[in-house]
Amino acid sequence: MNVVDLARRLATGVRAKALTVPLGLGPLRDAVRHRFALQFGALPPLP
Amino acid sequence: MELWSPDPDDAIRMLPPPPSPEPGVLDWERRAEGFLLRERGKEILLIDPSGRFVTRRGGSGSPELCLKWAAPHMRMLRNRPVIHAASLRIGRDLVAFCGGTGSGKSSIHRSFREAAGIVKCSEDLLPLGGEPLMAEEAGEEAIRRWARENAARFERGDRVDGPEEAGPTLQPLACVYFLDPARRTGRTISAEPLEPIDAFILHLRNSFAELGRGSCG
């Protein structure tokens, strides 16, 4: 396998998405918690 | 220029040549004896042409860090792919977050690890293997352990053989998210599906192909 074949296999065999995330760890952490609330109906526990 | 083509190989041939890379912190040079890595112009290490072993060439940096730099390239040369990605297992799904420095890869990894039910698999490197291609869930840990255990030998100038495979921890890769530093805006997370041709280009950028070879085998 060469790198072109690898990229082709990944591009055609695995879902790929462009992700937009907030800048900064604090806003990003809040966004992740919000995303989880939407996805699973409950917020994950805070550390 | 019309770049549309039903055949990706045709599209690749029609693309203009990529711009010459800016001189970076880390630069590779291909030599008869192998691949030489320089850090800010100073020789650091040499990987043999087949990717089987690495030797120190100088520099005063951390030997463990040098081995971590070498590891993904050694894997690629030995036909064992690796992508530049943080990864997590959410339930049964292993997802990867690809992107270069500053894209938010480590931040999102840190943010997710606080959530219950999430297993953090890798922070920077995601080795792949098997047929069909799957992710080595413990692959990065194996690379870190290899770097730790061989740091003293490397520092002495001994030849260090490459890391072995992580073992039977292969997981199907459910999704690859590509992070772009230019897209770090707003206060929420959003994801847009990518067309295969866009994903193809992004995978190439994150596949440790800097050694200038078309083949990783």
Image (cartoon, coloured by chain):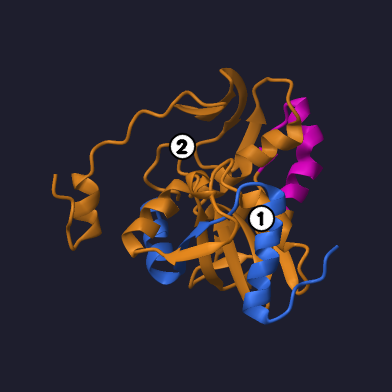
Chain colours: A blue, B orange
Query: Residue under circle 2?
Result: B211
Relative image position of residue B66 (x, y in whole percent): 68, 33
Q: Is residue B92 visible?
A: no
Could you tell me if the residues under marks 1 and 2 are in contact, i.e. CB atoms within 8 Å? no
Q: Secondary structure at mark 1?
A: helix
The relative height of residue B120 versus residue B58 in the rendered view (above or below) is below
Q: Residue at x 37, y 68 (%)?
A: A12
Q: Is residue B148 magenta?
A: yes
The one of B161 and B197 positioned closer to us in this rendering: B197
Q: Please give left or right for residue B6 compared with residue B83 in the image.
A: left
Main secondary structure found in the magenta portion? helix
Range covered by the magenta-colored residues: B142-161
Q: Quadrant of the N terminus of chain A?
A: bottom left
Lateral position of residue B42 relative to residue B32, left or right: right
Q: Residues within 10 Å of mark 2 (few under 14, many from 20)?
A: some
Q: Are marks 1 and 2 on the same chain?
A: no
Residue B156 visible, this orientation: yes
